[in-house]
Image (cartoon, rainbow, N blue to C red):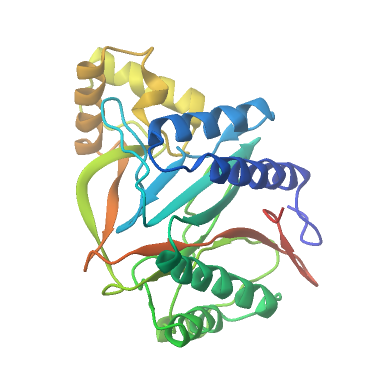
């Protein structure tokens, strides 16, 4: 990968993701079905010539991340609170990841504004070689000044080709363990401040509607449906996250659910449980994807 400017496929993915983010936000209305919003955003991404890099996430109030409607469940936009819409677009495996929060009442707007202010503060700070510690400290300073907490066990991340979380963790607080790590040329990163009026931590919920293939078949025996499911997922999504809504042509719902859970147990699939704020506080999020060049940083998902 050339280090002086972002790959054209990444630029295109960013253009599509930014448009999908705005389109999705326009659909967030009290009483609207989350399933309809997510499926409309996913189809919009496809209509623009890209592929959803992961299922559209729609996380409401204390739900911080990883909710997308599954085969059977849905949720509805409430009259008050915060809706986080996290979308990704992929072009030839190059992924752009972005998110927006929509406030449904005046009280929630303060929390939404804080996450956006933190992201904007980081954007002013960003340059090749910036320390991850300084990014996290900047986010935490905005949160504290606004009277909120950053969520410490949610973070930004590096992005690889067909890989949404590529190993590098970008903290949302002044994490001393990130003191010496820096953003180096050639990296693609998503930076996503999460703010809350709760405890500042998330816990896993029992609901899991998002999965990804780890890239290798397990050695233990597979049923015919499990083998077919792995092959289909590998062909369609590679190692990018998927939801069973996208696989209803593979098997009946009951068989599909059973095979998926078996493949999680056998180590072939990774599961992404819904994440909920530990104190049941409201959560807001803002996110852009960036490319770190030799001499500058490119905002890939800016409108």
Residue 266's place in the image compared with 43, above or below, is below
The image quadrant that residue 233 belongs to is top left
- The x and y percentages for residue 278 are 22, 66
Q: Residue at x 47, y 87 (%)?
A: 145
Horizontal side of residue 253 vs 249, given as left or right: left
Residue 9's place in the image compared with 259, above or below, is below
Q: Residue at x 50, y 73 (%)?
A: 114
Horizontal side of residue 48 vs 23, given as left or right: right
Q: Residue at x 64, y 61 (%)?
A: 187
- The x and y percentages for residue 125 are 66, 80
- Residue 94 visible in this rendered orientation of the protein: no
281 vs 265, nearest the viewer: 281
Residue 157's place in the image compared with 15, above or below, is below
Number of disc labels: 0
- The x and y percentages for residue 51 are 59, 32
209 vs 144, nearest the viewer: 144
Q: Residue at x 56, y 68 (%)?
A: 116
146 vs 129, nearest the viewer: 146
108 vs 2, nearest the viewer: 108
- The x and y percentages for residue 175 are 41, 82
- Residue 98 visible in this rendered orientation of the protein: yes
């Amino acid at each position: 990968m050339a280090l002086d400017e972002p790959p054209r496929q990444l630029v295109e993915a960013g253009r599509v993701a930014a448009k999908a983010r705005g389109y999705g936000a326009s659909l967030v209305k009290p009483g609207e079905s989350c399933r309809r919003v997510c499926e409309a955003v996913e189809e919009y991404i496809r209509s623009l010539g890209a592929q959803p890099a992961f299922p559209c996430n729609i996380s409401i109030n204390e739900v911080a991340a990883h909710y997308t409607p599954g085969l059977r469940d849905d949720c509805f936009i409430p009259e008050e609170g915060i809706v986080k819409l996290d979308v990704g677009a992929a072009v030839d495996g190059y992924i752009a990841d972005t998110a927006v929060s929509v406030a449904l009442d005046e009280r929630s707007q303060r929390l939404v504004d804080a996450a956006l202010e933190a992201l904007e503060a980081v954007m002013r700070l960003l340059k090749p070689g910036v320390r991850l510690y300084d990014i996290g400290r900047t986010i935490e300073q905005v949160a504290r000044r606004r009277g909120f907490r950053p969520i410490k066990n949610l973070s930004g991340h590096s992005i690889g080709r067909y890989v949404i979380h590529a190993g590098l963790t970008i903290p949302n607080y002044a994490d001393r363990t990130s003191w010496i790590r820096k953003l180096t040329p050639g990296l693609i990163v998503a930076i996503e401040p999460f703010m809350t009026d709760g405890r500042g931590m998330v816990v896993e919920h029992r609901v899991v509607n998002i999965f990804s293939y780890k890239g290798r078949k397990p050695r233990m025996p597979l049923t015919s449906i499990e083998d077919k499911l792995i092959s289909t997922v590998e062909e369609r999504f590679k190692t990018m996250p998927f939801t069973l809504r996208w696989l209803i042509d593979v098997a009946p719902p009951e068989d599909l659910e059973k095979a998926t859970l078996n493949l999680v147990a056998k180590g072939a699939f990774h599961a992404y449980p819904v994440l909920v704020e530990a104190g049941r506080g409201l959560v807001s999020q803002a996110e852009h994807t960036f490319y770190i060049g030799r001499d500058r940083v490119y905002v890939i998902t800016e409108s």
